[in-house]
């Protein structure tokens, strides 16, 4: 990742996403992905919660706009 222009090594843009616990509003994890759906899948597989509804009830994936 080239931090100077926010591009991956292949020249594709990526964005930072965060996984937020809905009840506590705490940021649990972050990742850099091209799309929100890809970030959701990354977090879902990482948490290893077998039921998608349970994951969605506990967590929210948001774009991380901090600098």
Image (spheres, rainbow, N blue to C red):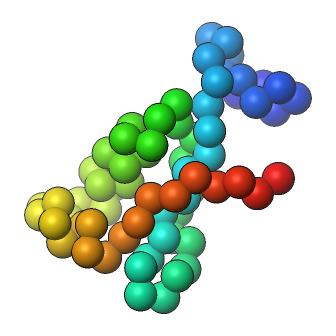
Coordinates of residue 16 in the picture (x, y in percent)? 62, 46
Q: Nearer the viewer, residue 2 or 5?
A: 5
User: Which quarter of the picture shows residue 9?
Assistant: top right
Give left or right: position of 9 versus 58: right
Residue 42 shows in this picture: no
24 left or right, relative to 44: right
Name the residue located 58 percent from the left edge and 52 percent from the top edge: 63
Viewer-proximal residue among 28 and 65: 65
User: Residue 24: horizontal and vertical position, in percent?
Assistant: 48, 88
Left or right, 29 with respect to 47, comes to right
Q: Position of residue 13 (x, y in %)?
A: 64, 24
Above/below status of 67 relative to 47: above
| Residue at position x 41%, y 66% in the image | 60
Q: Is residue 26 left or right of residue 46?
A: right
The residue lying furthest to the top in this view is 10
Q: Quadrant of residue 10?
A: top right
Split into 4 quadrants, where in the image is the N terminus? top right
In the rendered image, the vertical position of residue 47 relative to residue 57, given as above or below: above
Q: Report the residue that reaches farthest toward the left.
A: 51
Q: Is residue 33 above or below residue 62?
A: above
């Amino acid at each position: 990742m080239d931090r100077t222009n926010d591009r991956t090594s292949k020249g594709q843009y990526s964005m930072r996403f965060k996984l937020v616990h809905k009840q506590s509003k705490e940021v649990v994890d972050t990742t850099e992905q091209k799309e929100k759906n890809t970030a959701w899948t990354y977090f879902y597989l990482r948490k290893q919660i077998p039921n998608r509804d349970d994951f969605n009830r506990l967590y929210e994936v948001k774009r991380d706009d901090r600098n």
